[in-house]
Amino acid sequence: MISYFLNKLFYALLTLLGVITVIFLLFNVLPGDPAKMMLGQNQSAEQVEAVRKKYGFDKPKLTQYFYYLNDLSPLSFHNTNPESYTHLTNDKYTFSKLFTVGKTTTAIKYPYLRESFTKQGKKVSEVIGETLPNTFVLAVSAIVIAIILGLVFGVISAIYKDTWLDKFIQIISTVGMSVPSFFSAILFAWLFGFVLHKYTNLEMTGSLYELDDFGESVHIKWKNLILPAIVLGIRPLAVVIQLMRNSLLEVMSQDYIRTARAKGLNEYQIIKNHAVKNAMNPVVTAISGWFASMLAGAVFVEYIFGWNGLGKEIVNALNMMDLPVIMGSVLVIAIIFIIINIFVDVIYTWLDPKVKLD
C-alpha cells in the first residue's frame, strides 16, 4: 500500500511538473508585455519598468520559469537581497524560515500563484478561493443527478432489454451525449427560465449567492442551482446510463449469476446483492473522469447562466488577458484531476477485491 502511494505520488509530481511547464511556455510566448497588461492603458515608462523588475519580467525566460517553480513549490529558496524578486516578504508569501546559508534562505510556504493583472493587489489564490467552491457545488450537484438517474435508468434499461422502454431510454441517452452543453444551456435557460418562468419560478441567470434588492446582504438562492446542474449533468447522465446497461448485461450472463438463480434467489436479490456492485467498475471510471472534467468544462454553462464559478472566471480572465488567473486556474484543475485519479484507484479495491494496489 505504501509503495503504491509513493509510486503514485512520484508520477503525480512528474505530471504536475509537465503541466506547469506547458502552462508557462504556452502563456509566455503570447504577444504583449505582462507589465503593461497589469497596469492598463494609463502607465508611464517608469511604472512599467518597476513592475517588470518587481515580478522578474525583465529576466530571461528560463530564469522566469525557475522563479515560477519557486513560487509554486512549498519548499523554496530565496535571496536575502530585498530588491530581489525571490526575497521573502509577508505580503507575498505565507512562510516559515528553515535556515539561511550565505545569501540564500530556505523556507516552507504555501504555493504562490501570483497576483491578478486586472484585480490590482489581489492574489490569484484568493480569486480561485472565491469561485472554486461555487463550481464545486455545481459539479457535485450535476454528478449526483447523473449518478442517481443514470444508475436507475441503466438498470431499468438492462432489465427490460430490447423492449420499447429500453429503446426509449437509449434514444434519450444518445441525444444527451450528442447535444453540446452550451446549446443545452441556452435551450434550458430560454425554455424554463423565460417561456415557462411563471410555472417554474426559475431565472435565466443567477448564481448561488446574490445580493438582496437593497444591496445590503447576501442570500443563498438554491433555485439558481437547478438549471445549470441539470444541464451540466446531462452528458455524464447519458454516459452512465449506457455504461451501466452494457456492464449489467455482461455481468448478468456470468456463471455466478446462473448459480444464484439455481439457488432460488429472485431477480431483485440477484441484481441488488450481486450484479450491480460488480457492474460498477466502468461506471466509476466514467464518473471520476466526468467529475474532474466538470470543474474545467463548466465554463460555458457557468457563463450562460451567470454562475459565479471558476469557469466564468476563466472566461473573464481570457477576455482580459489576465494570465496569472488563467495559469493558476488550469493548474488547480490539473491537481484535482490527479487527486481524483488516485481516489478512484482506491475505490476499485472496494468494488472489486481482486484488484490490488501494487
Image (cartoon, rainbow, N blue to C red):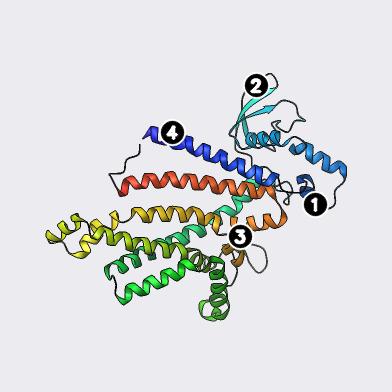
The answer to the question of whether label 1 and label 2 lie on touching residues, with beta carbons closer than 8 A, is: no
How many residues crowd mark 4 within 10 Å: few (<14), some (14–19), many (20+)?
few
Q: CA distance from mark 3 to mark 1?
A: 24 Å
* Closer to the eye: label 1 or 2: 1
In this rendering, is residue 313 above or below 84? below
Q: Is residue 286 left or right of residue 225?
A: left
- Which amino acid lies under the numbered mark 1 shown in the image of this protein? Gly
- Which amino acid lies under the numbered mark 4 shown in the image of this protein? Leu
Q: Which residue is mark 4?
A: 6
Q: CA distance from mark 4 to mark 1?
A: 46 Å
Q: Is residue 13 visible?
A: yes
Q: Is residue 276 left or right of residue 121?
A: left
Q: Residue at x 66, y 49 (%)?
A: 325
Q: Is residue 145 visible?
A: no
How many residues crowd mark 2 within 10 Å: few (<14), some (14–19), many (20+)?
some
Mark with earlier residue (4, 3): 4
- Which amino acid lies under the numbered mark 3 shown in the image of this protein? Asn
Q: Residue at x 55, y 69 (%)?
A: 185
* Closer to the eye: label 4 or 3: 4
Q: Helix, strand or loop at disc 4?
A: helix
Asked which quadrant contains residue 75, the reply is top right
Q: Which residue is mark 2?
A: 100
Most distant residue in the top direction: 102
Q: Which residue is mark 1?
A: 40
Mark with earlier residue (4, 1): 4
Q: From the top left corner, tell me how far across and down residue 265 is, in percent.
A: 15, 61
On residue 308, the disc is: 3
Q: Helix, strand or loop at disc 2?
A: strand
